[in-house]
Image (cartoon, grey):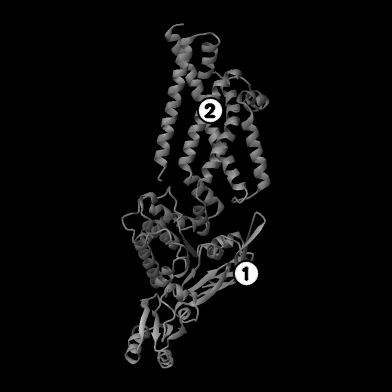
Amino acid sequence: MIEIKGLRKTYRSRGREVRAVDGVDLTVGEGDVYGVLGQSGAGKSTLLRCVNMLERPDAGTITVGGVDLTALNRKGLRLARHGIGMIHQHFALLSSRTVAGNIAFALEVTGVPRSARKERVAELIELVGLGGRADAYPAQLSGGQKQRVGIARALAARPQVLLSDEATSALDPETTDSILRLLQDLNQRLGLTILLITHEMDVVKKICHSAAVMRDGAFVESGPVAELLHRPGSTLARGLFPLSAPATLPGRTVVDVTVSGPDADTALTGLARNFDISLLEGSVETLAATRAGRWRIALPEDGTAAVEFLRARGAQVEAAA
Amino acid sequence: MTWSEVFDLLWVGLQETAWMVLVSTVLTAVGGLLLGVLLVLTAPGGLLSAPPLYSVLGLIVNITRSLPFIILLVAVIPFTRAVVGTTIGTDAAIVPLTIGAIPFFARIVEAALREVPNDVIAAATAMGASRGQIVGKVLLREARPGLAAGLTITVIALVGYSAMAGVVGGGGLGDLAIRYGYQRFETEVMVATVAALVVFVQLVQMAGDLLVRRLSHK
């Protein structure tokens, strides 16, 4: 659905060059929820703004729904943007328009005739759970409600792709959860493809099927979340399941174990039944796509048999560090 | 001079002031809005980024604003003759008033439009809005409270400028205060005129504030 190849973007400010995006390749499949995780300054915002050409890349191609955006003229780009929704960290609503007016704005821009707007607006208001607030102004809404307006507006033109620019970063944890659930629901019900950027590990944990970790303008790792968890030394695995218990114990072999899928719930009990182990730290959690567990475990001094046992169940085992 | 005579003078002056201010306000609103939008669009990084044009426009605005109004009034006399066919009278005063106020209001428009957050403009761009739609439906509409407040300031500035219209026979309250109150030592006329101006300005400001409150949803 989204295909990015060799993307580069450099900013020049006061004679200094900053390579915001430095050679990124990215493929987001249809119906995927893809999260790009990174600290501020990693270049993820620039990357996202290149996907709908709010920033024009210096090099590389961006294909959305089979159309190469970098090859379009101004008019073609405007039309292509109708098929790409975007939501923003600070909502970016029109303060002079009501909830209904903000959503109608997106329809006006895409050339939906006046007579068809009213019905579509009402439909979108219901879709995002804002029934009864159609005539409220943004200033009268809570952060979560504002973001719901942002989502309704982004979906007005029935896009296939939604870009999310830190959409939950300005919200409290509870509201964040409700917005994430809404996005997940839209992904499932409408088959909406979502590309989001975030600095919150939790967002990736809760809704992303695939993820990339970005640092200094480039991807450090990327792929399906379950696969990344099993990759030795994965930054994402360490971020999702931070393990800080001691990595060495006298007379024991300490390992970090990652299991995903149905085995995540049974691997540990199976191991404990057969070997003398101590669980030092870890948990089993429900990620968007799968169940996954990651633990730091102290095995007997010669842990070979226990490691064999775990690997036979699809676990990834590495020496604790 | 009897009070009845003073009131007659005041009534005529008030009408002249109101006419000059009304017409020049309408012309200034249109001209200043156009010039202000052009300044925002052509500014470096703007929607029609054209730094050389922006610099030229900015220079013209600054030069016009540097001239003391009384000098502008005299300097544009040939232009006034070309436009209204005469260089004296109330209508003749409207020309320099408008020319003086357009750059003033244009800068206010420019500042008000810049207050519209960048991410709101980016959001409209991302939705596929055209530049015309962004100017009309986002910039001008979102800036309405600021524009209304700015227009109020401009109207009051025009009331002030119009006091100098007497130089070209424009009449008005300010002229009355100068000719009767200052030059002929008619203190009653002076006081009455000043009182009328105070009330006039106060009413304009109140109407402006009311409009801003109606337009603002922040």
Residue placed at 47% from the left, 46% from the top? B142
Q: Which residue is mark 1?
A: A60
Q: Position of residue A4 (x, y in %)?
A: 57, 71
Report in which chain the residue with disc 1 lies: A
- Amino acid marked by disc 2: Leu
Q: Is residue A31 visible?
A: no
Q: Is residue A140 above or below residue A252?
A: above
Q: Give whichever of A94, A215 is nearer the camera.
A: A215
Q: Position of residue A247 (x, y in %)?
A: 44, 79
In this rendering, the answer to whether B16 lies above or below A287 is: above
Mark toward the viewer: 1 or 2? 1
Q: Give the residue pinned by disc 2.
A: B158
Which is more toward the observer, A289 or B168? Answer: A289
A225, above or below B60, in the image: below
Q: Chain of mark 2?
A: B
| Residue B126: mark | none
The CA span between labels 1 and 2 is 55 Å
Kind of residue at badge 1 = Gly
Residue B207, quarter of picture: top left
Dot 1 falls on a residue whose secondary structure is: strand
Is residue B105 placed above or below A214 in the rendered structure? above
Of the pair A194 and A310, the residue shown nearer to us? A310
Residue A208 lies in quadrant: bottom left
In the image, farthest residue toward the top: B1
Residue A144 seen by the camera: yes
